[in-house]
Amino acid sequence: MTLSVTNTLTGEREEFEPRNDDEVLLYVCGLTVSDDAHLGHARLWAQADVMHRWLSHEGYDVRHVENFTDVNEKIVARIGEDDLGESEEAVAEHFTSQVIRDMRGLNLKRAEVYPRVSEHVPEIIDLVETLVDRGYAYESNGSVYFDVTAFEDYGKLSNQRLDEIESQGVDEERSEKHHPADFALWKAGAVDPDDIAEHRHADLPEIDDACGQTWASPWGEGRPGWHVECSAMSMTHLDDTIDIHVGGRDLVFPHHENEIAQSEAATGQQFARYWLHVGLLQTAGDKMSSSLGNFLTVADALEEYGVDVVRTFYCSTAYRSEQTFGEDEMREAEERWERLERAYEAAVEACDSTDAYAKVEDEAFRESLTETREAFTAAMNEDFNVREAMAALLELATAVNRHVDEGEQYDFWALREAVEAFEELGGDVFGLSFGHAGSDGTVTLAEELVELVLDIRAAEREAGNYERADELRDDLAALGVEVQDSDDGPSFRFE
RNA sequence: GCCAAGGUGGCAGAGUUCGGCCUAACGCAGCGGCCUGCAGAGCCGCCCAUCGCCGGUUCAAAUCCGGCCCUUGGCUCCA
C-alpha cells in the first residue's frame, strides 16, 4: 500500500515517491508574524502535522522546515501599537513567541528548523544576484524585479497566462516593472509610510519616513521581497529540490507560482516535486482571515475547546477541501473526541478488570481490529484522508463498546490491541491525547475527595434518598466532574 | 473578465484518481427500544439523499464527456 497525493502542479493524484528512499524533505509555508494566529492558520499546521506524523509512522525520516516571515509591511504597520514594541523586530518577536506558544498548545510535532527572513538576508541577496546574473531579474531604481517573460514555465502551477495577467494590470505607466506580473525580489529603501497607512490604526502616531529594517545590498539599502524568502530558506535548509511543499490554497497564485519561477530560474532544477494545498477555513460563507476580522485566535480556541477537540475538528475534513467553522461543527468535534476517549478509557479499564482474566476469544471483535488498521492505513495513504481514517477509529470505538457492553468476560488480548490502536493511530498519528489520562498511577487529592463524595452519595442511594444523590451528582457536574453510574458502581472523569 | 477548487440527507462531511461491492461511509441533530431509581454514557434499530441543472457515452455514472447555473478562493497583503 503506497501513499498517493493530489499534486497541484499536475492537477492529478500521483503515487508519492520521495527523491531519497526513506527521507522526505517537507517545507510548510509559514505565516507572517503580524497578528495572532487564528484557526485558519492552525488548520494548515494541523494538516501538515498529520502529514508529517503519518510519513514518520510509515518509516520516513521527515525533514520539516517551516518559516516565519518576520520582515513585512504589516508588521511595520503595528509599531507602537499597545505594548507591541517600537520596532519591526520587537513587533515580530512579540507575535513569533505567541505563535510558538500556539504551536506547542496544538501539540504539533516540531519542525527541524523554523527559519526567519531577518536571519536569511545574505542568502536572499545571493539568490537575487544569481537571478540578475542569469538574466532573469533586473534592477530598477534600487529595486530588483523578476522578469516573468524570461521564465518560460511561468504560470505552470496556477495555469495563468501572462497576457491575461497583463490585461488586468492596473495603471502601470509609472511602474518600475517591465511587465505587470513582474514581482519584487528586492525593494529599495525602507517602508514607505503611505504604503501601510491603511493597515495602521488611526489613533497611532505618525511613523517617520524611514521605518522598518533595511539591509545593505549590491543595489543599495533595501528590504527583501516576499516571495524570495521561501525559495532562499527552502534551498538553504533543505535542498534545491524538495519533495513536498505545503501551503494554503490562497497562496497558489502568485506566491507559489513566483517561488517556482525564481527557484527554478536560479538553479535549473525542479523546486518542489509535490505541491499540496490546504483548503481554506470558512466562517459564515467567507474565509477566516485577519483582514476580514472574522477569526477566532488559536489561543482562544484552545482555551475554549481544548487541544483534542480542536485537533479532532481538523481531522474531520480532508485537507484539500474547504472546512466550515462554527459552533455546531465544534460541538460535533467535541462529541467525536469524547466518544473516542470514553471508548479508549473503557478498553483500558476492561483490561484491568477481573473479567479480563479468562480465556475468551471474541472473533468479531478481533476482526474489527484488523479492519480498523486496514481502513485507517488505506485512508491515510489515499491523499491523507483524515476524515476516513477518523471514521475507522470511531468504528473501533463502537467495537470496543460493544465488546465491553455485551461480554460477560473480556478478550484481554483484543482489548490490548484496541488500546494500542488508539494510542498509535489516534495518539501518534492524529496527535490526540490517548494514554495521558491518569497514566502516572498517582492519586490526586481531588480524586480522593470525589471518591469521598461518591461514597456519601452511594449511601444516600442505598437509603433510597435519590433526590439528595442526584443533587450531589449535579454539584459534581457543576465542578466539572462527570459521574457515570453502572452495574459495577459509579465512575467519574474530569472534564 | 481570467485562473483554480467546489456544489452529495436537517447539519456536517467521505466517496469522484482506476464507472459496477454507493440499495451512498463516519458523525451530529431527531425518533423508537434495551439498560438505569432517574440522568448520562453505551448498545440495537429507524428517519432524512432522484449525489446543482440539462444533455450525452455505457450493460452500468455521484464517479466519464459537453453545455449551463451557483458558491468559495486567487488575479493587491493573506495559511
Image: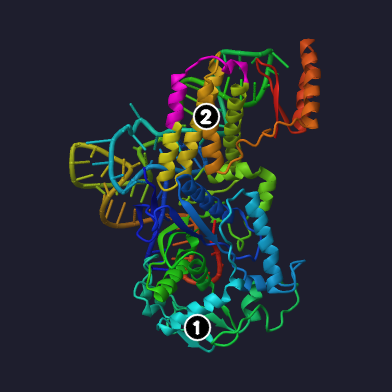
The image shows residue A23, relative to residue A251, as above or below, that is above
Measuring from the top left, give residue A167's x and y in whole percent: 40, 76
Instruction: Name the chief secondary structure element in magenta.
Output: helix
Q: Residues within 10 Å of mark 1 (few under 14, many from 20)?
A: many
Residue shown at 61% from the left, 61% from the top: A290
Asked whether A491 falls inside the magenta stretch, the response is no
Density class for disc 2 (Cα within 10 Å; few <14, some 14-19, many ≥20) is: many
Q: Amino acid at mark 1?
A: Val
Q: Secondary structure at mark 1?
A: strand
Q: Position of residue A156 (x, y in %)?
A: 36, 67
Picture disc at residue A144: 1
| Label 2: chain letter | A
Instruction: Residue A256: tell me if it is visible.
Output: yes
Between tags 1 and 2, which lies in front?
A: 2
From the viewer's perspective, tell me whether residue A43 is left or right of residue B59.
right
Rendered view: A422 above or below A154: above
Q: Nearer the viewer, residue A469 or A61?
A: A61
> Any mark on residue A418, and which?
2
The x, y position of residue A69, in whole percent, is 59, 67
Label 1 and label 2: CA atoms lie apart by 59 Å
Mark 2 falls on what kind of element? helix
Placement of A426 over or under A271, stated as above or below = above
Residue toward you, A360 or A103: A360
Q: What's drawn in magenta, residue-wise? A: A353-371
Report the side of B77 relative to B45 (left or right).
right
